[in-house]
């Protein structure tokens, strides 16, 4: 229902809107940015007065999650009833929608993209459950999976007999049963890329009844009318679905991501290093298309089938042709599994390896029978493992390298210091039995479970002290959901705040399956991180060191009280091939020990680092640093602060008085609770030279998470900062001050410098130049996306730039007396130091009055 669909859960389709006429549901619509909806033209055929319409958000009509009025409705000028052609409209909301987990926009595909017949899609709506004159709208949002049907088939005489135009597409099934129905008109037909970013492919338009054989649903084709949407709303894509032809695999790079995987909306070649790589801390959600409900279904005992490509690191280890254990791919040649999987086969592993295997990955789904096979070469068990449950971990080397694709990827390994909190959500996957001594599924199963504190797990009524510090518990003390037999060795994975997945546990042991007070016990991967590293030696594998997003901020003080700092330039330049996507203000580092080479030229005092990113996980990754920067001297940038969340560096900030700092608004998307943040000063993050606590966080009232405008916040400290030579405030420019193109400015931050992704202990600096906004808005650069409240800095020829890991930190300018002023907040850009893609900063002068209104400075 819809026809052949099911109810959805909160946050599962956050862009779905109910268009209500005089309070009654009439049509669906889709949120495409904070202020605009797209729907069907025929929804407004009878009633065009916007004051009678409201937009309702959430999975239920009553009560709704949120309601907004409609300011205006624009129907395509070529739509003529009773024709179905050009059946599209856009509606502007009376005020912008604040994004939440339950309300978020969908991505719009590029006009040139072609969805392929057979592509899996979902249609959602509040419409009738069947074709019935009495079938009204449903109170709870419903979903149904459909497949794209080629136009030629849909135009056959038994179907729609050549009535499908180039502005339409068909989706459903020719057998019927699964379809949209009355009241779903105007709603979304969406398709996901491999990163679970969702794109609007169609708008529910018309059909012959609902769910009838040979009569699939007909939808307005969004790509055909993409330019019209842009002309009416001004929405410029920040994401796209490039075709494979635009992205040939680079030579001599077998680990390069599958070129068919969707990336972002600027020319694909400019983002060739940017694809799907997990890290420890992910950036904010992509600005569109993310389903902010990470776990919309609970699924191994009480789990459910995994979707195609959902867990591409999961492997099936087979003994004599039968599934025996799970494993996780951590490089192109190595997997992690449980040592006990090999306790009965140790001799075979070294003498008759082929008895073990093949290892299987799904070839387009999660069925073992359809998988790719690789024979293991040998297994390396932990030296202290034995027949018991201690040190239950093993490395498995493959006889040949895995060819990565959208269905076969490696998982990130967490840092040894990474800690999970009690009740953190994690996912366990496997092909184990569905219940104790039950049948084995053919489809990979997934289950959402919760981390359980070891003390709770070790209680007398639970596992009675058997759980060591090298193990972790996950599941539910009430039972019901758990790993089970033959899930052993499989992954327990955790998504950080950027939706980057990490292998935190290996299925090890338990008392039965899903029994009350008997949660699953897993080998704690962080406890064996050093053993894994030493065992693999120079083997390439993905580490995901903590990443933090940081951009650039703004600040103020009178010049007479500002510290004077000598204007110095870095003596060593770093040039690193890095990727940063348009539309994702916060990115993250990638670590690959064999994929990074560094050469030092004494003559030029330059360091050039070249990165070959290897496919890993389900998200984009980049290297993290102030690009083209160098170490700073103690006290050189005394206003630079490190904004830490739960004690860990997260963003930069700038001291503008003895109580206030300025930073980026997006730094607080994770939490607005001041108690979670501390601020430290000095050139070193650890140990801090001076530390203070946060009393209040003030976000610009017009800032919308996931977008770039008004990306500014001020932070009030609990007590005054004692000014010293190496801790002092920066000056804020006057609102009327103009900084000319070509002026030299400096950006500072703690971006990672080493290939293994660790952050430098010393603050980094890089000199850049202010670039004229017209130049920055040229077609070959940002094509009009840079607003008056932003400025560009860097070099059009590339090389030196702010990059990921510097969010919230300062871009500063020295006047003729070497008094430094804060001029920008790094907000977004394409990659780092790329030709024609300088960094884009929020312009501090544009927010000078706002800062004064909030701080009195």
Image (cartoon, rainbow, N blue to C red):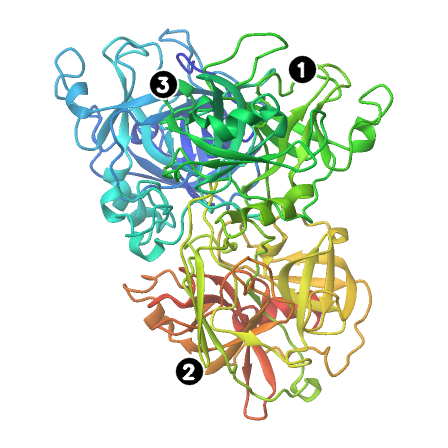
- The vertical placement of 85 against 677, above or below, is above
- The vertical placement of 424 against 218, above or below, is below
Point out the frontmost of discs 1 and 3: 1
Q: Which mark is residue 180?
A: 3
Classify mark 3: helix, strand or loop.
loop
Q: CB under 8 Å between callouts 2 and 1?
A: no
User: Quadrant of residue 657 in the image?
Assistant: bottom right
Residue 21 appears anywhere in the view: no
* Label 2 packing within 10 angstroms: few (<14), some (14-19), many (20+): few
Looking at the image, which is closer to me, 51 or 279? 279
The quadrant of the rendering that contains the N terminus is top left
Lateral position of residue 479 relative to residue 1, left or right: right
User: Quadrant of residue 297 in the image?
Assistant: top right
Q: CA distance from mark 2 to mark 1?
A: 63 Å
Looking at the image, how many numbered discs can be counted on the residues? 3
Q: Which mark is residue 137?
A: none
Q: CA distance from mark 1 to mark 3?
A: 40 Å
Query: Image point 55% across, 54% down: which residue?
Result: 703
Q: CA distance from mark 3 to mark 2?
A: 64 Å
Does label 3 or label 2 sit earlier along the sequence?
3
Q: Which mark is residue 604?
A: 2
* Label 3 packing within 10 angstroms: few (<14), some (14-19), many (20+): many
Query: Image point 67% across, 15% down: which residue?
Result: 513
Looking at the image, which is closer to me, 332 or 63? 332
Does label 1 or label 3 sit earlier along the sequence?
3
Classify mark 1: helix, strand or loop.
loop
Q: CB under 8 Å between callouts 1 and 3?
A: no
Query: Image point 59% across, 34% down: which residue?
Result: 394
Residue at image mark 1: 513
Classify mark 2: helix, strand or loop.
loop
């Amino acid at each position: 229902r819809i026809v052949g669909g099911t109810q959805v859960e909160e946050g599962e389709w956050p862009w779905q809107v109910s268009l209500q006429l005089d309070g009654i549901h009439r049509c669906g619509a889709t949120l495409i940015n904070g202020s605009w909806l797209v729907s069907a033209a025929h929804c407004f055929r009878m009633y065009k007065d916007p004051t009678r319409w409201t937009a309702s958000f959430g999975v239920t009509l009553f009560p709704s999650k949120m309601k907004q009025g409609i300011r205006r409705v624009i129907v395509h000028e070529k739509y003529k009833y009773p024709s179905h052609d050009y059946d599209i409209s856009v509606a502007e909301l009376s005020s912008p929608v604040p994004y939440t987990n339950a309300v978020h926009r969908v991505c719009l595909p590029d006009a040139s993209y072609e969805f392929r017949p057979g592509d899996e899609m979902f249609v959602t709506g509040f419409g009738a459950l069947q074709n019935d004159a009495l079938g009204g709208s449903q109170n709870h949002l419903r979903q149904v999976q459909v497949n794209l049907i080629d136009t030629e088939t849909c135009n056959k005489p038994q179907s729609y007999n050549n009535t499908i135009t180039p502005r339409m597409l068909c989706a459903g099934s020719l057998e019927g049963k699964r379809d949209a129905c009355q009241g779903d008109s105007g709603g979304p037909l969406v398709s996901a890329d491999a990163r679970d970013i969702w794109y609007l492919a169609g708008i529910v338009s018309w059909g012959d009844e609902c769910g009838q054989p040979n009569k699939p649903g007909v939808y307005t084709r969004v790509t055909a009318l993409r330019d019209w949407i842009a002309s009416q709303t001004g929405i410029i894509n920040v994401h796209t679905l490039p075709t494979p032809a635009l992205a040939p695999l680079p030579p001599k790079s077998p680990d390069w991501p599958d070129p068919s995987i969707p990336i972002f909306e600027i020319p694909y070649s400019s983002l060739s290093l940017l694809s799907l790589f997990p890290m420890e801390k992910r950036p904010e959600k992509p600005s569109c298309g993310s389903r902010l409900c990470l776990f919309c279904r609970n699924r191994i005992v009480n789990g459910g089938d995994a979707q195609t490509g959902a867990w591409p690191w999961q492997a099936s280890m087979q003994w004599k042709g039968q599934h025996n254990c799970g494993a996780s791919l951590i490089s192109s040649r190595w997997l992690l599994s449980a040592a006990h999987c090999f306790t009965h086969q140790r001799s075979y592993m070294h003498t008759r390896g082929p008895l073990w295997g093949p290892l299987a990955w799904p070839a387009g789904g999660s069925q073992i029978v359809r998988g790719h096979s690789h024979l293991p070469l040998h297994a390396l068990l932990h030296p202290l493992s034995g027949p018991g449950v201690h040190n239950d971990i093993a490395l498995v080397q493959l006889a040949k390298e895995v060819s990565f694709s959208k269905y076969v990827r490696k998982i990130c390994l967490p840092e040894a210091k990474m800690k999970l909190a009690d009740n953190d959500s994690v996912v366990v996957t496997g092909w184990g039995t569905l219940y104790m001594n039950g049948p084995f599924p053919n489809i990979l199963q997934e289950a959402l479970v919760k981390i359980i504190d070891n003390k709770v797990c070790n209680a007398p009524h639970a596992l009675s002290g058997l759980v060591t510090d090298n193990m972790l518990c996950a599941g539910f003390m009430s039972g019901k959901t758990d790993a089970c037999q033959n899930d052993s060795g499989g992954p327990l994975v955790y998504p950080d705040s950027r939706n980057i997945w990490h292998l935190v546990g290996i299925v090890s042991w338990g008392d039965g399956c899903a029994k009350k007070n008997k949660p699953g016990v897993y080998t704690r991967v962080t406890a064996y991180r050093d053993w894994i590293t030493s065992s693999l030696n120079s083997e390439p594998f993905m580490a995901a060191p903590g990443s933090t997003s940081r951009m650039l901020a703004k600040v103020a003080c009178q010049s007479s009280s500002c510290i004077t700092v000598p204007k110095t330039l870095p003596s060593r330049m770093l040039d690193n091939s890095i990727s940063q996507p348009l539309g994702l203000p916060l990115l993250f580092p990638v670590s690959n020990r064999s994929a990074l080479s560094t050469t030092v030229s004494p003559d030029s005092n330059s360091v050039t680092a070249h990165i070959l990113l290897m496919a890993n996980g389900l998200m984009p990754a980049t290297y993290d640093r102030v690009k083209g920067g160098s170490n700073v001297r103690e006290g050189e940038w005394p206003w630079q602060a490190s904004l830490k969340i739960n004690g860990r560096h997260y963003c930069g900030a700038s001291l503008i008085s003895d109580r206030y700092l300025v930073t980026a608004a997006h730094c607080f998307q994770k939490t607005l609770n001041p108690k979670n943040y501390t601020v430290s000063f000095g050139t070193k993050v650890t140990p801090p030279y001076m530390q203070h606590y946060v009393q209040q966080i003030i976000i610009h009232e017009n800032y919308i998470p996931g977008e770039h405008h008004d990306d500014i916040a001020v932070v009030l400290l609990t007590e005054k900062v004692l000014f010293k030579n190496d801790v002092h405030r920066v000056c804020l420019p006057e609102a009327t001050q103009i900084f000319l193109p070509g002026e030299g400015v400096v950006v500072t931050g703690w971006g990672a410098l080493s290939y293994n992704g660790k952050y430098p202990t010393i603050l980094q600096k890089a000199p850049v130049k202010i670039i004229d906004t017209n130049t920055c808005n040229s077609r070959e650069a940002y094509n009009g996306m840079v607003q008056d409240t932003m400025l560009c800095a860097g070099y059009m020829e590339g090389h030196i730039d702010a990059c990921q890991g510097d969010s919230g930190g300062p871009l500063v300018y020295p006047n003729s007396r070497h008094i430094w002023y804060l001029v920008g907040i790094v907000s977004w850009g394409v990659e780092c130091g790329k030709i024609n893609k300088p960094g884009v900063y929020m312009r501090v002068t544009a927010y000078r009055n706002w800062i004064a209104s909030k701080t009195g400075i």
